[in-house]
Image (cartoon, grey):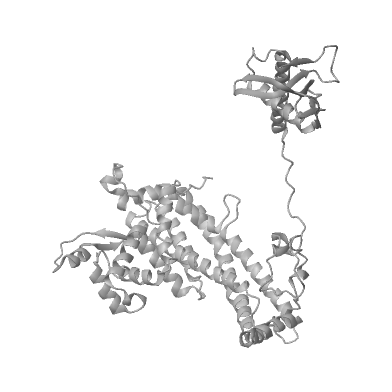
Amino acid sequence: MEEPASRTPDFDADATRRRLDAYAYLSAPERLEHIAIMRVFCGTLLADLAVPDVMAKLHESGGPGMGLDADTLTARLEQLERWGNLLRGSHTVKASSITEYQRSRARYQLSRLGERIQRDADGVLAEADAAREVSNELLALVERGLRELAELVSGPGGIAPQDGLERVSTLFVQFAEFADSVRDFYAYLGQVLARYDLDSAEYQGFKELLLDYVEAITEDVAFRAPRISAALDMLWPHLPALLDRLDAHAQGLAGLPAQREGRSEARVQRSRGRELADWEGLRGWFSDPDGQGSQVDQLRDATLRALQSLLANAKRMLRSATGEMSRRRDLLRLARWFDEAAPQDAHDIAVAAFGLYGARHLGVPPATDEIVPAYTSWWTGPVVEVPVALRERGSRAQRGRAASVEDHSEQKERLREAARERVAARRAAADELRSASGRFDDVRLTSAALSLLLELLATALGNAQLRRAGGDGAPPFGLDAAWSEDADLGIRITVHRTAGTRTLLHSADGDLLLDDLELVIGRASATVGGGAAVSVS
């Protein structure tokens, strides 16, 4: 069995963005005026219009665009041209002023994408809420056309190219109309199924729609689908030769010289039925060649779901004391009371109808630094963030599979390596200080050694105890217990206050001068192995 050919074009982000921009006018604040302008252009064929022409047609048609002045209309047309819905045109114009010339010189015509989008938008606006009938009579025509085409193709001499072309085009037009009507009807059916406020009259019409109309559709499709599949199986071996013969007879736009030589930049969309992918789509609608399910199976499943929804609504109706499936009438009366009540009365009605007294009943505590009295109104009270799980499902329980624990072994190893490097650097700085003790005037400390010395000096001065000194020539204050040490680094520093002492330390970051301070650097008491402390002055 041949695999279905993919008709998905290559993804082009820029082209996709430009095409989506053409839908922007349908959601813009001035969308009603834009739609009125686009309807003016859709009412013409291959005509480029200037601002005065568009303004005159808007005044004739009436509606939202009839009040636009020339400047505003020019801005709207330029915006539609930037979005890609209109194209610029240029014709010789006659004008009596420069302003009139500028407005008349800018002429616009409808782009292909803009025309297609506006046509679809008008269809949605006109028939969005209507139930479209399913053209199931076309299914019999599709079956007959396939059977006759298979007989003619497999017969002696084959089928005449022109006859084959007419039959293929007719066949796919009929099938496309039938498939579109089925898709629109079941979309409407899904919209009705989503309602839970049907009264008795609406429910009765819904029941007749399902039990009569839908049942007739599914029975007809179930009856025709095997016959259409059999006709396609008989036609399938002859299909490649048939398509080649039709292309040789009439290639359409694809047969132009520029297209054959690959010199045209415009892509050609072939008529339905002229490519093998179209036939594969037709075959996949009625049969299941690739095991992924056919459209007939989906139609049957959708009908079953609709019937199940009908039964569920019937059960609600039987349980209802009023004979209806919902309390729609009571809710409408309550809504009218809310609309007519004063603000304070509306609060009382809400409490009486729904039993909601305060946000604290939701079980979500406020922030720890906020104390909200029980009498605080919802309108003036602080907002409490409600978790998504509690807001949507009414439960705090986590759903889904727990995520696997992330492996942080590499990050931990990097952190351990960085810690080892820092410890090694500090030990090297401690060794440098000990080796440089007693000869600070002759050595130049590194930045790490000076930083460690300043750290120990600050700790020592912070631990110092001041005492008042006596005697002539002695400083007024002395230092007791001014020392600090790092047992891990094996270094100890002691500071004495001595009048007239100047200690000068040279380092890569600059020189440090200590007045009236004497430093004693040695090993920490826990690591002393017999060496004495060194006095530096």
Q: Position of residue 51 (x, y in %)?
A: 25, 68
Position of residue 517 relative to residue 68, above or below, is above
Left or right: where 443 falls relative to 252: right
Q: Position of residue 155 (x, y in %)?
A: 41, 53
Position of residue 152 relative to residue 343, above or below, is above
Return the residue nearer the eye: 53 or 267. 53
Left or right: where 147 falls relative to 488: left
Q: Residue at x 56, y 66 (%)?
A: 221
Q: Give the quarter of the figure containing the N terminus.
A: top right
Q: Give the quarter of the figure containing the C terminus.
A: top right
- Quadrant of the rendered image containing residue 204: bottom right
- Quadrant of the rendered image containing residue 93: bottom left
Return the residue nearer the eye: 79 or 197. 79
Residue 430 in sight from this viewpoint: yes
Q: Residue at x 77, y 28 (%)?
A: 460
Return the residue nearer the eye: 431 or 67. 431
Q: Residue at x 67, y 74 (%)?
A: 310
- Quadrant of the rendered image containing residue 529: top right
Position of residue 496 relative to residue 58, above or below, is above
Position of residue 44 relative to residue 479, above or below, is below
Q: Position of residue 37 (x, y in %)?
A: 33, 70
Left or right: where 68 falls relative to 153: left
Q: Position of residue 533 (x, y in %)?
A: 80, 15
Residue 421 in sight from this viewpoint: no
